[in-house]
Amino acid sequence: MIISTPPTPYYAVIFTSILDEHDPEYFRLNDMLRQQAEKLDGFLGEDSARNDYGISISYWKDLDSIQQWRQNADHQWAKQKGRKDFYKEYKIRIALVEREYGFKKPSAR
């Protein structure tokens, strides 16, 4: 499901990654981090997909909220562990979302 976001503008943190190998610990850690992020006031939601190449886009109300998440102790620890144990490569991009539009097919009744 694609998450609903508030009216623009808001921010998107785009995290693209390639894993070294499939490790169930990675997915447990990822779930724990999402639960931590959901507790923050400025977190708006996340869209994510993964196979060999992963992309997660988290949405935030402002840059201060992103900075608060960046400084979260669990997040800091997970980034270090990710570099050491999980990722072959990753990149983070931060973007201001100024406009959005979409389509959703009506469900059949």
Image (tube, rainbow, N blue to C red):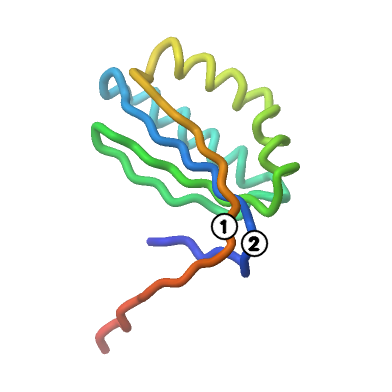
Real-space CA distance between mark 2 and mark 1, rounded to the nearest whole angstrom: 5 Å
Point out the image quarter for the N terminus: bottom left
What residue is rendered at 40% in x and 35% in y?
A: 16
Q: Tell me whether circle 2 and circle 1 mark residues in contact (CB < 8 Å).
A: yes
- Residue 105 % position (x, y): 30, 79
Q: Identify the disc placed on residue 9.
A: 2
Mark 1 — residue?
97
Q: Nearer the viewer, residue 86 or 33?
A: 86
- The correct choice, above or below, for 80 with respect to 98 in the image is above
Residue at x-position 67% and y-position 23%: 73
Q: Percent position (x, y) of residue 95? A: 56, 47
Counting residues from the start of the chain, the first of labels 2 and 1 encountered is 2
Q: Quadrant of residue 23?
A: top left
Residue 25 is left or right of residue 32, and the answer is left
Q: Amino acid at mark 2?
A: Pro
Q: In the displayed structure, does residue 104 sit left or right of residue 3? A: left
